[in-house]
Image: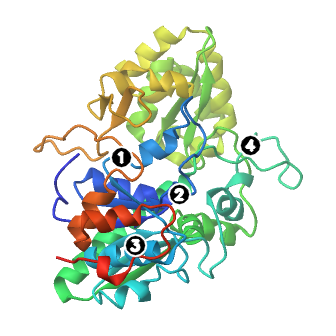
Amino acid sequence: MYDLLSDLSIIEASSFVASPTAGLYCAQMGAEVIRVDHKEGGLDYDRYLLTEEGRSLAWENLNRAKKSVALDLRSGVGRELLVELSAKTGNLITNLPEKSFLSHAAVAAERPDLVSVRIMGWHDGRQAMDFTVNAASGYPLMCGPEEWDMATAPPVNQVLPAWDFITGAYCAFAMLAALRHRDRTGEGSEVRVPLGDVAIGTLANSGAMAEMLHRGGDRERLGNAIWGAFGRDFRTRDGVRFMVAALTAKQWTGLVRAFNVEHQIAALEQKLGVRFAEGDRPRFEHRHSLFDLFQRKAEGQDWADLSAAMAREGCTFERYRTAYEAANDPVLVGDNPLFATTADNPSGLEYPAPRSFANMPEREAGAPRPAPFLGQHTEEVLAERLGLSSAAIGTLVDRDIARLSDKDRIYA
């Protein structure tokens, strides 16, 4: 936690991954992020995996450091209150449809300089989620063993909802860009970020779209090899599987020394008429010969010896871990200043939680704050932001209330 955004308050009305991630990143930099949910929990409130008590660990971690307001968002008064909270605050992150009650126009009618960031599915309004836009992007058909036929082999989906997290990060950036514009001009902004555009736009930004159009066809599958450079997984004599990458001359030279293959590389270069130290292209184009050579050397050594040699030579490598192993790893987590153990989580579980990914050596990062309980800050926020009396708030949380009468509204 840093306090760089301590003067910023944001209303977040969202669910699932991308939208809560945008709020999370702002909260980790010190913003007051007030998440507003339906009083029984939003669509993601009980998202798998659940603890024995029914707490969603995904919800708990995507909503750290936020405040929670719970309203009856199926009623007119609950929706009206969310619109008013958004207008009073002036900054909104949401993935509710633009044509819903929480449209930019509805909130901007009360707050003309509103900054709203809205996560959409596709730019034309169609629904989407990470795994469906990933299917459209082409990436799953680039994945899989090299020997698989492009025309008949199945796609390989990624486990991580990467487009959601990239979209969340982009939305946090877009929010701050729009706020900077408002500070300079006084103008509000409506920002729409389609999840599908993030995926297909990233395909273009990476150069892959231009590549496909240039080659007039699809890229071949590469298994675990790195496209356009030297890198792949190998296995040692004692069964440890690890990944290496050599994108620079220094990385390549270190890897050759660590594997003790200088003579074999020289002989291969003479045979093929290339110099592998000259760049990615010869290493990639002759990757199969290189992979065979490095695998033969790897399977003749134990991991402890080979990893020590690679470390001495400054190689870029890492062994494969299961996610459970990663969560318990002393280097990745235990001794990493990114993490601090949290015990006051709504689930009641005690486990490490990350601070902001950004590391600022001149500033001390505060401890990660827990997620709120659903509705924990409802009374506080409604009183502070809308000036509602305790009696009015008590009426609001009544399950049978249909609408709050005007006489019960007391504004500051």
Marks 1 and 3: CB-CB under 8 Å?
no
Q: Amino acid at mark 3?
A: Leu
Q: Quadrant of the C terminus?
A: bottom left
In primary-sequence order, the first of circles 1 and 3 is 3
Q: Which mark is residue 386?
A: none
> Which quadrant of the view contains residue 43?
bottom right
Residue indicated by mark 3: 82
The answer, for residue 274, to whether it is visible in the render is no
Spatial CA distance of label 4 from label 1 is: 41 Å
Cα distance between the residues tagged 4 and 2: 36 Å
- Find residue 313 and report its horizontal and vertical position in percent: 37, 23
Please state which amino acid type lies under the numbered disc 2. Gly
For residue 372, which numbered disc appears in the image? Answer: 1
* Residues at marks 3 and 4 touching, judged by CB atoms closer than 8 Å: no
Up-down: is 2 above or below 103?
above
- The amino acid beneath tag 4 is Gly
Q: CA distance from mark 1 to mark 3?
A: 18 Å
Q: Nearer the viewer, residue 284 or 180?
A: 180
Disc 2 to disc 1, how far (Cα)? 14 Å
Per the image, the residue denoted by label 2 is: 42
- For disc 4, the marked residue is 144
